[in-house]
Image: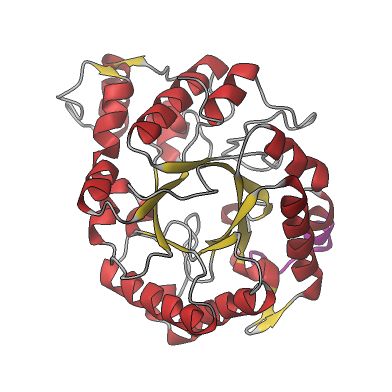
Amino acid sequence: MAAFKGFMHGMGIGGWLTNYKRFNVLPPERRFPLSIGDFEHFDTYITKRDIDSIASLGMDHIRLGFDQIVLEETPGVYRERIWKLFDAFIEWCESAGVNIVLNLHKAVGNYCDIPEPVSLMDSGELQDRFLHLWLAFEDRYSGKPHIAFELLNEVRNIDPALWNALAERTISAIRKKNPSRRIIVGGTCWNAPAALANLKIFDDPAVIYTFHNYAPFEFTHQRGVLQPDTLYYNREMPYPGDIERYRDYQRYVHGAVDPYPRFTRIDKEFLRHELQPAFDFTAQHPEKILWCGEFGTIRHCKLEYRENYMRDMISLLKEHEIAYCVWNYLSTPNDGNRFSLVDDDSRRILSPELARIIAGNAD
């Protein structure tokens, strides 16, 4: 498998320029305008101290998620105040010696947590704005090869051909300005490993492919308040875990008789099965780079279970020489899916063992 040099083990930052509030509880007319509180949050939430702390954990890159509406004041017009935050973040990363993934976490027309009247894939105007946004990033950071562009986080369950076409158009436009910019592309269905099979493979060594994994969902999102199924079941789920508890979740929530007929436990072998499409991708395309851009567990899950899960996930990724980025550094108080790996007040890693695990040193 080709190596993603300088991007082998990283940490994502959400809650700053994305996931800073939950849009699903807001009426449509209040979802996208930015408030004075939003700007105060953007200006103060992450500082150089946070970047230095992440680097001290042995991370070699940071994935920064951002929303289109945070930077884009009007179509094609960008907020200089937000550009300066990107500039500062990049300077902090350069000072700390960590590389950068800039991830468009939520684009207009592709939000994972709210319905929108027009899909990005159905609107030429939205696609033009999407393309223009990435060209603006290339223009501003053209001399910084340590920055990779992740075109779009978790494309919804749409026709893969539509996303492949937009990704190809965007890559082609960036290539006219910069033939070597590292560009990251994931599949549909929220970056599910199985969606890699429908992703266009580009004749371009600087295109990197990505996937996410949150299986089993009833564990990683247990008692989560944003998903009706986990909210309804409202039960602690261990990892590794007794298969009967997981079967009961499926029966109780979905009426499924036995969704896990091959397994006796939810454990590392279950994860291996879930990740098999990604392993198949590496076998089929050994010259390409594959990067797992997100995986993690909800914050109120027992720390022991979180450590067990992250240890098995990272062990499997390393076994197949797949680079990875854990989710997530820090969570805002109103984030119903708090996946933070540090204490939200002290901003210290939750345990020495967790620090060893996410740095890839727990084998």
* 108 vs 252: above or below: below
Q: Residue at x 31, y 69 (%)?
A: 202
Q: Residue 74 in the image: state x and y as whole percent.
A: 67, 82
Could you tell me which residue is drawn at 28 percent across and 67 percent down? 200
Tell me where residue 232 sits by quadrant: top left
Q: Residue at x 76, y 75 (%)?
A: 79
Q: Is residue 268 left or right of residue 71?
A: left
Q: Is residue 139 magenta?
A: no
Reply above or below: 231 against 13.
above
The residue nearer to you, when weighing 257 against 205, is 205
- Identity of the residue drawn at 28% across and 54% down: 195
Image coords of residue 163 (percent x, y)? 35, 70
Q: In what quadrant of the picture does the C terminus appear?
A: top left
In the foreground, 215 or 199:
199
* Count of numbered marks: 0
Visible residue check, residue 156: yes
Q: Is residue 232 visible?
A: no
For the residue pair 129 and 135, the one nearer the viewer reads as 135
Q: Quadrant of residue 256?
A: top left
The percent position of residue 147, horizontal first and vertical second, equals 60, 61
Figure colour scheme:
secondary structure
**Drawn side of residue 316 relative to residue 116, left or right:** left
x then y, percent, for residue 315: 40, 27
Looking at the picture, tell me which residue is in the foreground, 8 or 161. 8
Q: Write down the region rendered in magenta.
A: 29-40
